[in-house]
Image (cartoon, rainbow, N blue to C red):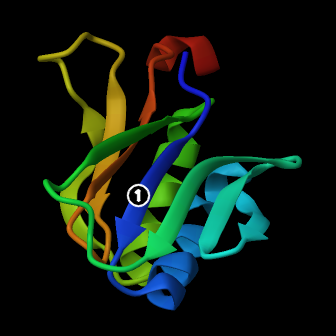
């Protein structure tokens, strides 16, 4: 199990604003700024750390878990409004499995950020 992920971003303030807005539907918020690093997560623990500099290469794919499909949709809307570029509208991805419901966007540095819910649709009835 992963504890946290760290990425180098081109523009710290731009990425901070993007991630705060895009991940707000998941309950993420800014939980730390330690030296040159910012940390977004919940409680007191950051799950995503980022630092300004030259962007991490190659581009990353980072997927976050959602408890329901509405959260996946809310993430996608918030991320696009925050300046993300669509890289996968909300929907089922049957190539992975029948309940894989996800959406993804490219962040300001081109990293693919995905939010996925693995719970079957009929579980929410």
Q: How many labels does the image show?
A: 1
- The secondary element bearing badge 1 is classed as strand
| Residue nearest the observer in this picture, 107 or 46 | 46
50 sits to left or right of 60: right
The residue at the far right in this view is 43
Crowding around mark 1 (Cα neighbors within 10 Å: few <14, some 14 to 19, many 20+) is some
Locate residue 43, reporting x and y percent.
88, 47
The N terminus: image quadrant: top right
Locate residue 51, reporting x and y percent.
49, 71
Residue beneath the point at 66% across and 60% down: 39
| Residue nearest the observer in this picture, 115 or 107 | 107
Locate residue 84, reporting x and y percent.
32, 75
Residue beneath the point at 40% across and 87% down: 11
Residue under label 1: 7
40 sits to left or right of 13: right
Residue beneath the point at 32% across and 82% down: 10
The C terminus: image quadrant: top right
35 sits to left or right of 92: right
Q: Is residue 124 above or below residue 11?
A: above
Locate residue 98, reporting x and y percent.
27, 11
Instruction: Indicate the quadrant where residue 105 lies.
Output: bottom left
Q: State whether residue 125 appears in this view.
A: no
Residue beneath the point at 49% across and 83% down: 12
Instruction: Indicate the quadrant where residue 35 lies.
Output: bottom right
Q: State whether residue 76 appears in this view.
A: yes
Q: Is residue 101 above or below residue 123?
A: below
Q: Is residue 58 above or below residue 15?
A: above
């Amino acid at each position: 199990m992963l504890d946290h992920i760290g990425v180098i971003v081109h523009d710290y303030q731009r990425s901070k604003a993007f991630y705060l807005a895009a991940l707000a539907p998941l309950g993420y918020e800014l939980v730390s700024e330690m030296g040159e690093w910012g940390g977004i997560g919940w409680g007191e623990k950051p799950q995503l750390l980022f630092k300004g500099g030259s962007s991490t290469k190659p581009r990353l794919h980072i997927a976050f878990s959602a408890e329901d499909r509405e959260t996946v949709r809310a993430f996608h809307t918030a991320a696009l409004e925050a300046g993300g570029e669509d890289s996968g509208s909300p929907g089922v991805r049957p190539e992975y499995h029948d309940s894989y419901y996800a959406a993804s966007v490219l962040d300001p540095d081109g990293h693919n950020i995905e939010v996925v819910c693995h719970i079957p649709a009929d579980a929410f009835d």
